[in-house]
Image (cartoon, helix red, strand yellow):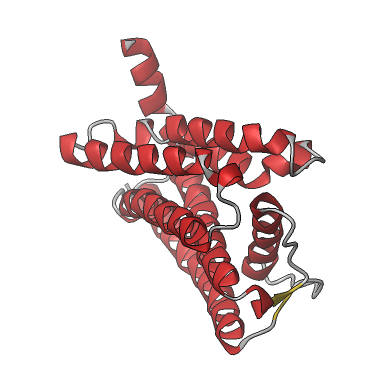
Amino acid sequence: MDKLKDFLYQNKYEILLFGLIQHLFIGILFFDLSGTLKFVWVSNIIVLGFATIGIFIQKGKRKNQIRNILLFLVLLITLGIPFNNENLFFLITVNVLYILFFIFIFWEVLKFLVSPSYINKDVISAAACGYFLLIEISVFIMQTHFYQNPKSFNGISTSTPYASFTDLVYFCCITFSSIGFGDITPNSQQTKLFTSLLGIIGQFYSVVLVGILISKFSSHEKK
């Protein structure tokens, strides 16, 4: 048990990065979004929850309790998606819990990124984790808005919550990376403004991150 705990702590950002990537892009491996993915959807939340353990080792009892409560609520409410996929209040609650969960993790990652004066694999992995966490947060904010106003986007599938999630992951990724293929487009004033904000946040994070990494590298070289 101690060896597993040490492994999770020593490789916490690499493990979290894996957890985030598999959560966002697990649909690559599956073609049936309405069948198999229901089981996978729950499974990858369990994997993601496991991947966050190392981040909160040595963070104190209170933070671990908050993480455990948020993860339990996220997992519990995810189990109910197949039975409540037409219940607007339920779907919005799901998204709010996910947003809180990812913001909580992002804050811990961000504090680590700005604190050390060195650069190593943890700093690089944490930087990537921060990027994917911003995408996660943006996806669930967008999905909350989409549930409230299905006409706020053109090109988003409404067949299942899983299909709309996959489309929004794609949309947020191409927005953050400034690719913008145009096959999915915002169709309301709020969505257009938030999409613009996403693009700015993505570029700002990249610019600030490069500055932080260069500063850490320069500091390391001087020492």
Q: Which quadrant is the N terminus positioned in?
A: top left
Residue at 25% across / 43% down in the picture? 66
Q: Is residue 90 above or below residue 126?
A: below
Residue at 71% across / 53% down in the picture? 163
Left or right of residue 3: residue 145: right
Residue at 74% across / 37% down in the picture? 35
Residue at 64% across / 78% down in the picture? 152
Q: Is residue 172 above or below residue 20?
A: below
> Which sits in the foreground, 90 or 200?
90
Residue farthest toward the bottom in the current orientation of the protein? 189
Disc tally is 0
Res 10 → quadrant: top left
> Which sits in the foreground, 140 or 179?
140
Left or right of residue 142: residue 35: right
> Which sits in the foreground, 52 or 15?
52
Res 175 → quadrant: bottom right
User: In x, y percent, where is residue 147?
Assistant: 58, 67
User: In x, y percent, where is residue 5?
Assistant: 34, 19
User: In x, y percent, where is residue 212?
Assistant: 41, 60
Left or right of residue 100: residue 177: right
Q: Is residue 197 above or below residue 144?
A: below
Left or right of residue 69: residue 37: right
User: In x, y percent, where is residue 216?
Assistant: 39, 54
